[in-house]
Amino acid sequence: MNWFSETSYSRYKAQYQQTSGSITCWLAVLICFLIALEIAIFGFVPGIENPETALAISWSLLIAAWILMLFSFVSGFAYDIQQSTIR
C-alpha cells in the first residue's frame, strides 16, 4: 500500500497553495498596518528612544502595507486571468 502517492501529494500541494496564497498577502498587510498603528498611537518601539526614528519606522511600515495591498490586488487579477484561460 502506497500512503504517499503522487496524486494525493499534488492535490494537497495545490490546495495548500490556493489557501496560503489567498491568506498570506492580506495577513502581511494586516500585520504591517497594525504595528504601524500601534507605533502611531502609543509611540512605543522596543529599543528605540528617538521619536524621529519611531516615526520613520511607522511610515515605513505603512508604506510596506500599502505596497503589499497593491501587490495582493495585482495577484488577484492575475489569478482570475489564469483561471479564465484554463476553462
Image (cartoon, rainbow, N blue to C red):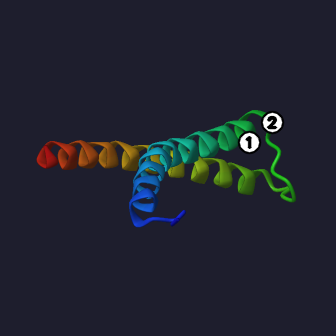
Instruction: Where is residue 5? Give x, y as percent.
Output: 45, 65
Q: Quadrant of residue 38?
A: top right
Left or right: where does residue 4 sit relative to residue 73? right
Say which of 47 and 56 sits in front: 47
Q: Residues within 10 Å of mark 2 (few under 14, many from 20)?
A: few
Q: Position of residue 73 (x, y in %)?
A: 34, 42
Quarter of the picture holding the C terminus: top left
Residue at the disc numbered 1: 39
* Rendered view: 70 above or below 17: above
Residue ID at (47%, 44%): 19
Q: Are marks 1 and 2 in contact (CB under 8 Å)?
A: yes
The amino acid at mark 1 is: Ile
User: Which residue is situated farthest in the front direction here?
Assistant: 1
Residue at the (52%, 52%) spot, across then down: 64
Q: Residue furthest top?
A: 41
Q: Secondary structure at mark 1?
A: helix
Name the residue type under label 2.
Answer: Phe
Mark 1 vs mark 2, CA separation in Å:
5 Å
Return the residue nearer the eye: 82 or 16: 16
- The image position of residue 12, as x and y in percent, is 46, 54
Percent position of residue 27, x then y: 57, 43
Residue at the image position 32 percent from the left and 43 percent from the top = 76
Q: Nearer the viewer, residue 78 or 47?
A: 78
What residue is disc 2 on? 42
Q: Secondary structure at mark 2?
A: helix
The number of numbered badges drawn on the structure is 2
